[in-house]
Amino acid sequence: MKPYPSLKSIIAELLPLHRTIVSDDMDKTLAIIGGYLPDQANYALQTYSPGTKIWTWVVPERYIVHAAYLETESGQKVVDFADNPLHIISYSLPIDKILTWDELEPHLRYNEKFPDAIPWEFKYYERDWGFCLPKNQFDKLDRTARYHAVIDVEFARDPELGLKIGHGVLHPAGGAANGAGEIIVQAHSCHPMQANDDLAGVVSTIELARRLAEKPLPEGSMSVRFWFGPETIGTIAYLAHNEDLIPNLQAGIFMEMTGNKNKLAWHHSRQHDHLLDRITQYVLRDKDVDERDFAAAPANDERVINGPGVNVPCISLNRFPYEEYHTTEDNLNIMDEAMLQGAADVAEEIIRIFASNYIPKRTFRGPVFLSGHGLWVDWRENWNLNRAIEKIMMRFEGEHSIFDIAEQTGLDYWETYEYVEKFRAKGFVERLPIPSEAHTS
Ligand SMILES: [Zn+2]
């Protein structure tokens, strides 16, 4: 596990790479991410062969750019991929042709709001070709001239050059807990030259993994799976190749755009009032945050994780909207270390509660002889807990999780957890896992 001086420094390292859904630089990105993850996560890559059917989708080919530029007929460069990979629309088809302005113009993209920025555009599936350039440069182009468009690219189909994802799992103290299941944390990493969308989510997730490795979740908790790869298609490819993981998934957290100076927004799960939603609300109760519906813009991999046939409750954490979105203005200048860390703080607390939560099931009959077993709480020391003891003991029938009990008694989650754990240590309650809502087909 490589140390890092700041999360921003990892963004700086990954930013220049031409990361697009299936590409050589995407492989490099996934390797670099792995270097920063804790060794205990056993981070590994999976490769899916282009053309493979994955549910209703197909694994795309690898996009290899040999050269791409636009020049005037007399050979004056207008834009060059070598200067910035955003100059071509990702997955542009090959072309080598002299064009009039009228033929060229429909293939040029710019951004009105930032006239000096290059926008990032992609055509992964309805393939076409095109160049992206600053609006100010577009305005100055000679409408009477002819232009030479060159896009020399390859769509590689070799199985070993397939779509790659990176994943790893951190287990709680004492190792994987039988039947507890997993939480999946996802950050996509396929947006070339974009800092906030999407490297910010990647580094907040790296930070989260390091914290969970440094201070593991309590014994018996869920494990936490970390996932990096191309947006949407990567998650579909991953789940379609690892269907056996799905029934074990209890929840998902999708992180992106965590680095700009804006308040945090969280999007509900598709279930809307799932335990995961309530725990998120609890963690953010005193914070100024935006609360949004499931997959309200922007919508990402949570549409797969929490979508049809998978249905794992998944929230999204981000700091959207921001104006620089999908342009060269989304760069290190708008990245803030405290914002990146702040998103990790929130995700960490949600996970610590969600993963440690369980359903305590009574093994005793009659009210427990509290003082005889060291379970009595002196009202002079903790009035609220003393008042709640009866209510807590009445909720050990296998219907309520510890979080439910904390909510119903108005106690702090961790205080409730610690107290219930004392009953479990005495053998008065046993731990029941929370049932998963994942679809099995
Ligand atoms: Zn995006």
Image (cartoon, rainbow, N blue to C red):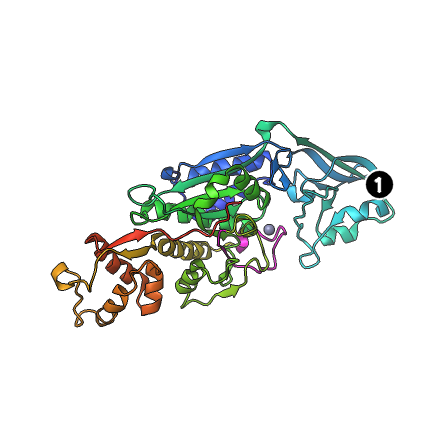
Q: Is residue 255 visible?
A: yes
Quarter residue 160 falls in: top right
Q: Is residue 427 magenta?
A: no
- Point out the image quarter for the N terminus: top left
- Please state the horizontal and vertical placement of residue 266, each as a whole percent of the image: 50, 60
Please indicate, yes or no, whether residue 16 appears anywhere in the rendered image: no
| Span of residues in magenta | 312-334
- Asked if residue 160 is positioned above or below residue 421 in the image, the reply reads above
Dot 1 beta carbon under 8 Å from ligand 1? no
Q: Residue at x 30, y 63 (%)?
A: 395
Q: Name the spot of residue 186 as percent of width and height, x first.
A: 49, 47
Q: Is residue 129 left or right of residue 259?
A: right
Q: Position of residue 409 (x, y in %)?
A: 31, 69
Residue under label 1: 99
Q: At numbered mark 1, what does the secondary structure look like: helix, strand or loop?
A: strand
| Magenta stretch holds residue 314 | yes
Q: Look at 54% across and 62% down and name the residue there.
A: 293
Secondary structure mostly taken by the magenta-highlighted segment of the chain: loop
Q: Residue furthest right?
A: 144
Left or right: 245 in relation to 143: left
Identify the image quadrant of residue 422.
bottom left
